[in-house]
Image (cartoon, grey):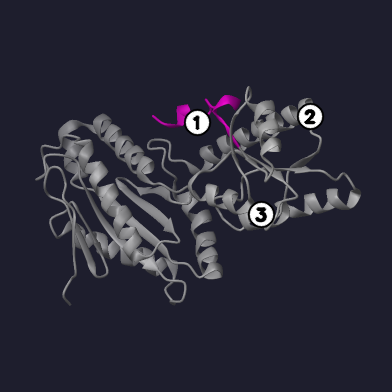
Amino acid sequence: MYIEQVDNRTLSDCSVLIVDDDASSRLVLETLLQDIVACESVSSGRDAIEYCRFKKPDLILMDVSMPELDGHETTALLRKKPQCEGIPIIFVTSSSTEEEESKCWNSGCVDFVVKPVNACTLQNRVKSHLKNKMRNDLLEKLIYIDKLTGAYNRHYLDDYLPRLVRDGLRNITPLSLVIFDIDHFKLFNDMYGHLDGDSCLWKVSQCISSSLLRPMDKLVRIGGEEFLVILPNTDTQGAVEVTKRLLETVYDLNIKHAASEFERVTLSAGLSTKQADDDKTIEYVMLEGDKHLYMAKTSGRNCVKAEGFTITGNESPIKATKRRILV
């Protein structure tokens, strides 16, 4: 249902982020590329890092000489973020010395162009790297994307999650996991058939994916009707807010489910958080999330359980509330 769509991207579907502290230079680059690819621009390395927290460009054109953070320093910081490490970066430099060229390559760029920029050279290098990026993206999707739902699969989870754990330890940031289960999904399949069941899985997956606001947040199908949402740099309170939104959006899809007490498709979920300074293994965090999922399913469904929190939704439109669990 989904995998047939992954190779339809063209250059016009790609996005380029231009990073340059000089407004006229940004305008020149945008003008040269506007007929090829969509461009956005920022004026500093800090702004580029902030931009990439919420969006993931297909390519970055990075000026080398900038105040505060230069292009080399900005690239080094971006490369430390798992969601940014696959973005090709082309340096734009005013120096063509052998020393500067070596420094550019050592900083992790895929290419560089020299100012004043030759229009033909810039356009062709951007097109070449974007085409290569699209090929790599397609290969990654064929390996890591679940063919039915478009969510990531267990192969991706095995490769991606350990890197996030290391990143959290290095940056002293929490990592939250939310395990979802579609309520009464077997009954849904029995009542409506497996084709409608597959359609339901796809709709729920797309709904959840579109509700995740940061590139670093990932949806993984871990089996059947069970999904995992990975929320890096997110504590329990933050994960509760994200989960509340996901619960609401799936409820509001209003997919008919006559065998459910809610008469529509709903989710149950369990949430668990690994703090950077605790000794929990990621396997333990997964088991803890699974335990909370079981608690949610045995507590009336259409709710989320976490350590110290319950979020329930049983009205239309859903009204989620939070209360402290008395131990």
Kindly indicate the quadrant of the structure image that contains residue 264.
Answer: top left
Position of 177 compared to 6: left or right? left
Task: Name the residue located 74 percent from the left edge and 32 percent from the top edge.
Answer: 125
| Residue type marked 3 | Thr
Q: CA distance from mark 1 to mark 2?
A: 29 Å
Q: Tell me if I can see residue 147 in this picture.
A: yes
Label 2 residue SS: helix
Q: Which mark is residue 284?
A: none
Q: Residue at x 34, y 59 (%)?
A: 239
Q: Is residue 12 magenta?
A: yes
Of the residues under marks 2 and 3, which one precedes in the sequence?
3
Q: Residue at x 34, y 57 (%)?
A: 178
Is 86 positioned to the left or the right of 258 in the image?
A: right
What's under tag 2, amino acid-wise? Thr
Q: Is residue 225 magenta?
A: no
Circle 3 sits in a helix, a strand or a loop, which is it?
helix
What residue did someone put label 3 on? 74
User: 10 Å neighbourhood of mark 1: few (<14), some, or many (≥20)?
Assistant: some
Looking at the rendered structure, the kind of residue marked 1 is: Val
Q: Residue 28, located in which quarter of the rendered image?
A: top right
User: Residue at 54% of width from left, 64% of height from top?
Assistant: 167
Residue matched to label 2? 121
Q: Tell me residue 16's x, y (percent).
A: 61, 36
Secondary structure at numbered mark 1: loop
Q: Are marks 1 and 2 in contact (CB under 8 Å)?
A: no
Q: Position of residue 241 (x, y in %)?
A: 30, 56
Label 1 belongs to which residue? 6
- The answer for how far apart the CA atoms under marks 2 and 3 are is 24 Å
Instruction: Work out whether mark 3 precedes mark 1 in sequence or the reverse, and give the earlier one.
Output: 1
Q: Which residues are magenta?
A: 1-16
